[in-house]
Image (cartoon, rainbow, N blue to C red):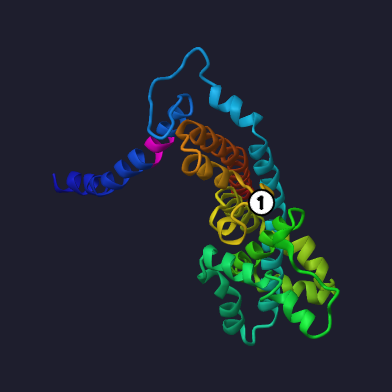
Amino acid sequence: MALRWSRVTPQLALAPAVLITVVAFIGSIVWTVVLSFTRSRRLPDYEIDWSNPFRQYTRLFADAGWEISLRNLIVLAIGSALAIVLGFILAAMIERERRGEDVFRTVFLYPLAVSLIVTGVAWRWIFNPQLGLENFLHGIGLTGVSFNWLNDGQTAMYAIILASVWQSSGFYMALMLAGLKGINQEIWSAARIDGVSLWRVYLEVIIPMMKFTFLTCAILLSLGVIKAYDIIVAMTNGGPGQSTWLPAYFTIKAMTEKSNLGYASAAASMMLVVTLVIFLPLVALTVWQQRAARKGGRA
């Protein structure tokens, strides 16, 4: 009897966490999807208009703001991928030069300790023509230089990408550094004996061996990009115009300013679809490669 009770105890301990996950996570997703088929305004209205249940989605895809948000999401995803590249370069430099590793790792990880709101405010000051980098450069005689990116709809997203890369590159550096330290040192010794150049070792040996680390970084990056909101509010608040709108910003704006719960729920549901379209293939690829690696190891 004591043995049976020991088997049940872990399940009982996990039961509250599972219940909270089902109610708060899965339940909220179902609730949001249901509301997206209703005419809910400020308060929920659970009556679905079966004559036109996709009313909110039709409005959503006809909204120019939503189209801009999706386009900016793609731009932000491509630009933010530079954080993974920069993180790998930093990790490779630190791993090759062991002296001062702790100092450099702390310095590069420091931006991660700063919230995205604080990061956005700091970079907004940097791009301020009267207070930031442009004012400094003009002060030393470089009057032809302009860094007023946030006031130009063509460059505002690039300023946000720059701030995002600065904030997150240290995190990806830490992940890459952990992956590099897991590589057998005999590989470096063999490459040195064979006279293989350093860049060829990284491109042809090290990077393929770190494919799981790169996939992990890609998954985390995709999730961060899709839910990006606070840095937009801190730096541009969606402006100039609608030039820096993202799906998360669009959704919250539809809820708070338009007081349209049904419309915001439709946007949130589409964010879930976008997340699944990006997230599931990456997870499936990771699982497939892990199984392939296990089969190769057994063979």
Q: Position of residue 163 (x, y in %)?
A: 65, 65
Q: Position of residue 266 (x, y in %)?
A: 52, 32
Verify whether residue 26 appears in magenta: yes
Residue extending farthest top: 51
Residue at figure coordinates x 71%, y 60% from the top left: 151
Q: How many marks?
A: 1
Looking at the figure, which quarter contains the N terminus? Answer: top left
| Quarter holding residue 149 | bottom right
- State the predominant SS element of the stretch in magenta: helix
Report whether 32 appears left or right of 225: left
Q: Start and end of the magenta stretch?
A: 25-29
Is there any visible trace of residue 84 in the rendered image? Answer: no
In the picture of the structure, the residue carrying the numbered disc 1 is 244
Q: Position of residue 140 (x, y in %)?
A: 80, 86
In front here: 241 or 27?
241
SS under mark 1: loop
Residue at figure coordinates x 76%, y 69% from the top left: 147
| Quarter holding residue 24 | top left
Residue at figure coordinates x 58%, y 84% from the top left: 103
Is there any visible trace of residue 214 in the rendered image? Answer: yes
In front here: 169 or 270?
270
Report whether 51 appears left or right of 204: left
Few, some or many residues within 10 Å of mark 1 (<14, 14–19, 20+): many
Q: Position of residue 69 (x, y in %)?
A: 65, 43
In front here: 10 or 59?
59
Residue extending farthest left: 1
Q: Amino acid type of disc 1?
A: Thr
Residue extending farthest front: 130
- Answer above or below: position of 99 versus 83: below
Verify whether residue 80 appears in magenta: no
- Answer above or below: position of 53 versus 18: above
Report whether 155 appears left or right of 297: right
